[in-house]
Image (spheres, grey):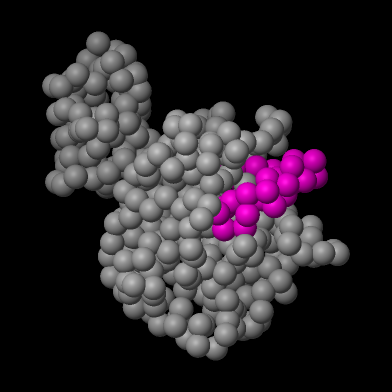
Amino acid sequence: MLIRDFDYELPADRIAEHPAPRGESRLFCPQRGGPDRHSKIADLPRLLRPGDLLVVNDTRVLAARLFGRRPTGGQVELLLAEKTGGSEWLCLMRPGRRGRPGATIELSPGLTATVVGRDEGGLFRVRFSEPIEPHLERIGHVPLPPYIKRPDEPADRASYQTVYAREPGSIAAPTAGLHFTAEILARLRGHGVGVAAVTLRVGIGTFKPITTELVHEHRMDREHYRIPAAAVEALADTRAQGGRVVAVGTTVVRTLEAAALAGGGAPAPGDGDTDLFIRPGFRFQVVDLLLTNFHLPRSSLLVLVCAFAGREPVLAAYREAVAGGYRFYSYGDAMLLHRN
């Protein structure tokens, strides 16, 4: 398939710069009829069935964007991508021309970062003068996606984090989960819907555009995931009782389906790494429904959603959502899809 087959027109004013109040986003259900077609996220408990299982990604976003200065006074921006051990990280750097080996960046009094080199993917290997993690809450900034054209604000520290975030390590939020409140989760449980958590550390690959003309030539970055034994048990119980598995976001889909491939058809508990690229023709083994935000044109996330629910139905739904004033991308509205 060609990447141009996954394109659509989006007016700039449809890109959400700020989130709706948590729990008040719109929810588009293109495969339903009547009043359920255009709902709200608060309606989700009545749209699911008792016995269904909601699976969330409990990763926690790091305040991973850092600003510092070279001894000459030039400003440098670092984005933490992956810890490689001790006080060393792989980072994106802007401007990259300042990233020569040996270059030093002052982040705050007594705290510096030194460029050690670059890896094969072009990321800068940076050594901090001491472990950076304890300093992130003080000097770090929320790594908002590049299509949000504003600086991060204090409110983003809460709004760009799910209410169930537990495991630090991501540089982007699993954004389908941003819609949930503790009250909505309690109502789901009261309706007989189970809730289980897995972890996938979202990396910079989530923003990596597809630059190849042929979709299948795109390569995903590797990301780490963890599936607890409790989640595997909940999945097995749901299947045994005829319930459906509802993935909250594409990160959960990739985690469960990658683990199923590694486990011979069913996820097993434990840790793993995945560079799984889900595209049309993929055979889903775990996920039955997908709650997801609206994704960028020509992106691996949109390709995944089209693989799940069908390219033409998904793109038709996107066109309807644009016409209907839905808000797009990380801080936008959501849609609920059934597997094709």
- Establish if 269 lies above or below 240: above
Residue at 32% over, 71% down: 263
| 191 drawn magenta | no
- Establish if 166 lies above or below 295: below
**180 or 245, which is in the foreground?**
245
**292 or 310, which is in the foreground?**
310
Residue at 49% over, 44% down: 300
Left or right: residue 305 versus residue 48 is: left
Dominant secondary structure of the magenta stretch?
A: helix
Q: Where does residue 117 sit, x and y in percent of width and height?
A: 16, 27
Left or right: residue 254 versus residue 273 is: right
Q: In which quarter of the view is residue 39 placed?
A: bottom right
| 323 drawn magenta | yes
Q: Which residue lies most toward the right here?
A: 34
| Quadrant, the C terminus | bottom right
Residue at 54% over, 47% down: 303
Q: Where does residue 142 sit, x and y in percent of width and height?
A: 44, 40
Residue at 16% over, 47% down: 85
Q: Which residue lies most toward the top here?
A: 72
Inspect this view and state whether residue 140 appears: no
Mark count: 0
Q: In which quarter of the view is residue 234 placed?
A: bottom left
Q: Where does residue 190 sit, x and y in percent of width and height?
A: 63, 82
Left or right: residue 168 versus residue 104 is: right
Q: In which quarter of the view is residue 204 placed?
A: top left
Q: Where does residue 155 sit, x and y in percent of width and height?
A: 55, 44
Inspect this view and state whether residue 125 appears: yes
- Establish if 199 lies above or below 72: below
- Establish if 234 lies above or below 198: below
The span picked out in magenta is: 305-333
